[in-house]
Image: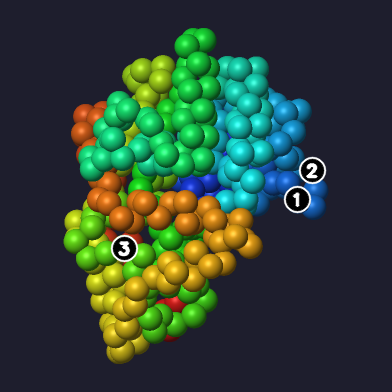
Amino acid sequence: MKKQQTVLILGATGGIGGEVARQLRDADWTVRAMKRNASTDVEQKDGITWLKGDALRQADVEKAAEKCSVIVHAVNPPGYKNWPGLVLPMLENTLAAAKKAGATIVLPGTVYNYGPDAFPVLYEDSPQQPQTQKGAIRVKMEQRLFNYSKKRSRVIIVRAGDFFGPRAGNNWFSQGLIKPGRPVTSISNPGSRGIGHQWSYLPDVARAMVQLLKNRHKLESFATFHLGSHWDADGTQMIEAIRSVVTRHSGKAPKTASFPWWLLRLLAPFNETLRELMEMRYLWKVPVRMDNSRIIAVLGKEPVTPLIEAVEETLKGLKCLP
């Protein structure tokens, strides 16, 4: 029985991985997490077993995944760096470990693997013809996971919009709209008025994954789901939510400014992270909405925290409120 409730989280020090780890722990799962720079081989902390290991070492992943029924592959290169060289090798190690343990693989997905031919509304079976390097890598990841699912194995992919949350890592909310650790006096808007944008609150994404795992034996061997989360229909609702929360806490409304894309373009040749951000600019130029009919059909409803509440918790977590 214990084997059916043991999970390995790869990327638990990041935003989505950490959130899934905590929520599975609270749902009475035995949670293991791997940490590359851990001071000891095994550490118990906050109800999670931390194991020293590197997602780029197959032996480390296989050892950590022993007797696990689920592996959550939420690990990404830090700072968007060296995607071509690191992303697929890390996934191959997860696939090898999952095959050995007979584990279900859960992948937090994105919209990167879709191209303009699939816009403006994305369905789980929309054609995947991306026009970016990161998108092409995402397509390869999902194809390898699909091949794994054909070997009497199970894969769950949950695709979401741009992440935000109190413990989120690299994301547009904390890197583009505001500055973490500082009072919000100005909000940058990467998009244009009238262009819709899809946002996903990390605790809601994790909650959806936990609920899907609870129902995993009822799902197809390769099950993909889109989250509707928070659809900013005209590109201004997120900005207004931040302004409303900040004004209520500080008594002063922050200003709004256009995101300095011109500066990113100048600096991108000298910074890999900025180059990766520039590659994703197309998602701010056109409305891209995700249809969530499939997850509603399975769960009855999608877990969604009200936008104002989600923004307030995010700003508190990022230490931006007095």
In the depicted structure, whether residue 153 falls above or below residue 197: above
Spatial CA distance of label 1 from label 2 is 7 Å
Image quadrant for the C terminus?
bottom left
> How many labels, in total?
3
The secondary structure type at the circle numbered 3 is: loop
Q: CA distance from mark 3 to mark 2?
A: 45 Å
How crowded is the residue under tag 1: few (<14 C-alpha within 10 Å), some, or many (20+)?
few
Residue holding disc 1: 38
Q: Residues within 10 Å of mark 2 (few under 14, many from 20)?
A: few
- Circle 3 packing at 10 Å, graded few (<14), some (14-19), many (20+), is many
- The kind of secondary structure element at disc 2 is loop
Looking at numbered disc 1 in the image, what kind of residue is underneath it? Ala
| Quadrant of residue 124 within the rendered picture | top left
Q: Position of residue 268 (x, y in %)?
A: 56, 61
Res. 191 mark: 3
Q: Position of residue 33 (x, y in %)?
A: 63, 42
Reading the image, the residue beneath label 2 is 41
Task: Look at the numbered discs 1 and 2 and tell me whether their residues touch, using CB distance below 8 Å.
Answer: yes
220 vs 47: above or below: above
Query: Is residue 59 in view?
Result: yes
* Residue placed furthest toward the bottom: 251
Which residue lies at the image location 28% right of the left edge and 35% below the top edge?
Answer: 118
Residue ID at (60%, 24%): 95
- Distance, label 1 to label 3, CA atoms, is 39 Å
Q: Is residue 277 left or right of residue 120?
A: right
Residue at 43% from the left image edge and 67% from the top image edge:
261
User: Which kind of residue does numbered mark 3 sit on?
Assistant: Gly
